[in-house]
Image (cartoon, rainbow, N blue to C red):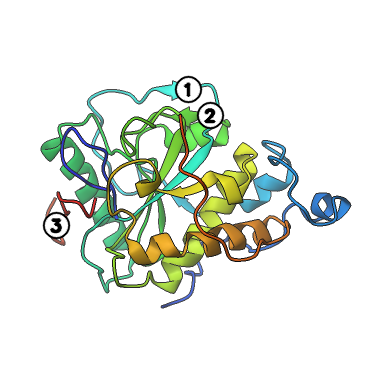
Amino acid sequence: MIGSPGRSTPRGEPLVPANIPFTRRGLLGSTAAAMGGLLLGPLPARSAASALAVPRRYTRAEWAARPPTKAANVLNRAPDHIVVHHTASANATDLSLEHAFALSRAIQNFHMATNGWEDTGQQLTISRGGHLMEGRNRSLAAIDAGDLVVGAQTLGHNDHTIGIENEGTYMTAQPTGALWDALVATCAWLCGVHGLDPHEAIVGHRDYNTTACPGDVLYARLPRLRDEVAGDLGLRRRAPEGPPPKPSGLPGPRFTFDHGPAV
């Protein structure tokens, strides 16, 4: 989802690293049991249980982000959809935290220097090593408050969606196990905080814009993602299904991002 200026953009089998203290559990098990395990509507926003689901997040200060040219706009409302992207960059074999930090700096540099944006476009980034990092400034504080930072990740829909950039290109390749587990954990956390139904809220970039993002392979795995997130939240999993209806309304490693239809 790192795309070209003036367009919406993307980003687009080790285990979860031990330093990510997220425990996969049924967070709302008692509520789901009371309803017979069925998800009958949105989850209650900001439930006490959701606070237990916070994965290890690396802040902008930790990955040494540049100052934005302008502070991000924060809306006093929750997002209604979680948009899955791929970075359309190389499928790196370096799964280290250092590489993940370099990735975040490279994305920010690309977005600011090439795209001319005020900061990184997406709110969250997950490396192939499973490291979850804050993207756009003020994003983590906004999520923790139940609010939304307006990003630059889904053209025409940045005022109601939150974007997750997943490192790599997933047209034919599979994501690493570490990235996948971190993506499930991140989506479960976001659904718990914002009271979202994972079966309705989790979409791909291509559901909104004309783009190949998040790649054919990762896009095809979105039904499984919704199902695993629902399971982590203690909700009944649905049978395999297609995507939901299209929503309406620095020195160091070199990173190359795609400007074309892959984003």
Q: Earlier in the sequence, mark 1 or mark 2?
A: 1
Q: Earlier in the sequence, mark 3 or mark 2?
A: 2
Question: Which residue position holds label 1?
Answer: 75
Left or right relative to 93: residue 218: right
- Provide residue 221's location: percent of width, then percent of height: 46, 65
Q: Mark 3–mark 2 contact, CB under 8 Å? A: no
Q: Which mark is residue 147?
A: 2
Judging depth in this view, the residue of 28 and 258 nearest the camera is 258
**Residue occupying image coordinates x 26% and y 34%:** 119
Judging depth in this view, the residue of 198 and 182 nearest the camera is 198
Q: Mark 1–mark 2 contact, CB under 8 Å? A: yes
Q: Quadrant of residue 172?
A: bottom left
Look at label 3 and name its amino acid: Thr
Alpha carbon separation for disc pair 3 and 1: 32 Å
Left or right relative to 192: residue 136: left
Residue 6 visible at all: yes
Look at label 2 and name its amino acid: Asp
Q: Earlier in the sequence, mark 3 or mark 1?
A: 1
Q: Residue furthest bottom?
A: 13
